[in-house]
Amino acid sequence: EAQVTQNPRYLITVTGKKLTVTCSQNMNHEYMSWYRQDPGLGLRQIYYSMNVEVTDKGDVPEGYKVSRKEKRNFPLILESPSPNQTSLYFCASTSLGTGAEAFFGQGTRLTVV
Amino acid sequence: LAKTTQPISMDSYEGQEVNITCSHNNIATNDYITWYQQFPSQGPRFIIQGYKTKVTNEVASLFIPADRKSSTLSLPRVSLSDTAVYYCLVGGSFYNQGGKLIFGQGTELSVKP
């Protein structure tokens, strides 16, 4: 079954404690990205990757890092989380063809206290 | 990137057909039109995609007029489980989009018994 898997689904952490949210896809997609969703602000892209070792900033990259060492994995790293990073996070993957369908993970609800 | 405009919310009753229209006046020649569905706290899910005329799958139909400046998502005989936010996206190859899916505010559909 084609899927994008994020872990953890829920996370409560304290300010400044480094954390990683993992994302893995089983469709051999070249493109992966991270979004955050906040009430009234919709879905905003954090980072994206067009292929292995190729990453770029999205609209709201401050406070986040990513890496793409393997095609299937695209972890999101918060080196020093702050309360304004409390949000619902989604990972997505797609092939790079014209009009390709995007597959989203189940989401990770992060709370930083 | 083509901007989209859709109603903020719509109400319907079980068993009715629901039509959600999206306006995209500056759609480019190589842009596709894609609709996603999102339930609360879940990732967006691909519903249907088209380029022109009419596309139908097992869950919805997509009507696109000849000028392609708008599109209509049609959900036949909705049920309570169709209550969700529906997003209209317009875009072509991810290479041309800077690797980004642009989600607007979406249409919040509420289906009542």
Image (cartoon, coloured by chain):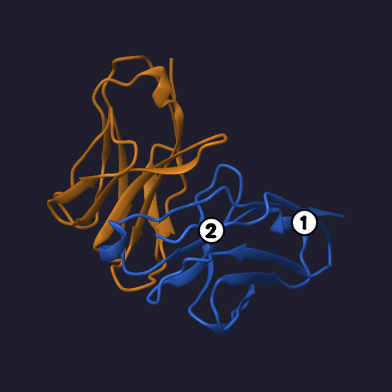
| Residue topped by disc 2 | B4
B14 shown above or below A86: below
Name the residue: 72% across, 57% down.
Answer: B81
Q: Position of residue B109 (x, y in %)?
A: 71, 54
Name the residue: 28% across, 30% down.
Answer: A62
Q: Position of residue B87 (x, y in %)?
A: 56, 57
Name the residue: 23% across, 24% down.
Answer: A79
The amino acid sitting under disc 2 is Thr
Quadrant of the rendering where the C terminus of chain A is positioned: top left
Residue at mark 2: chain: B
B101 shown above or below A95: above
Q: Determine if residue A29 is in view.
A: no
Which chain: blue? B
Quadrant of the rendering where the N terminus of chain A is positioned: bottom left
Which chain: orange? A
Mark 2 neighbour density, 10 Å: few (under 14) some (14–19) many (20 or more): many
Q: Splitting the image into 4 quarters, where does residue A30 fall?
A: bottom left
Viewed as shown, does residue B104 lie left or right of A73?
A: right
Q: Choose between A27 and B43: the one closer to the eye.
A: B43
Name the residue: 53% across, 66% down.
Answer: B25
Q: Position of residue A95 (x, y in %)?
A: 30, 67
Badge 1 marks a residue whose secondary structure is: helix
Q: Choose between B8 and A109: the one closer to the eye.
A: B8
Viewed as shown, does residue B58 lie left or right of A97?
A: right
Which is more N-terminal, label 1 or label 2?
A: 2
The amino acid sitting under disc 1 is Leu
Disc 2 and disc 1: Cα gap in Å?
26 Å
| Residue topped by disc 1 | B80
Viewed as shown, does residue B86 lie left or right of A104?
A: right
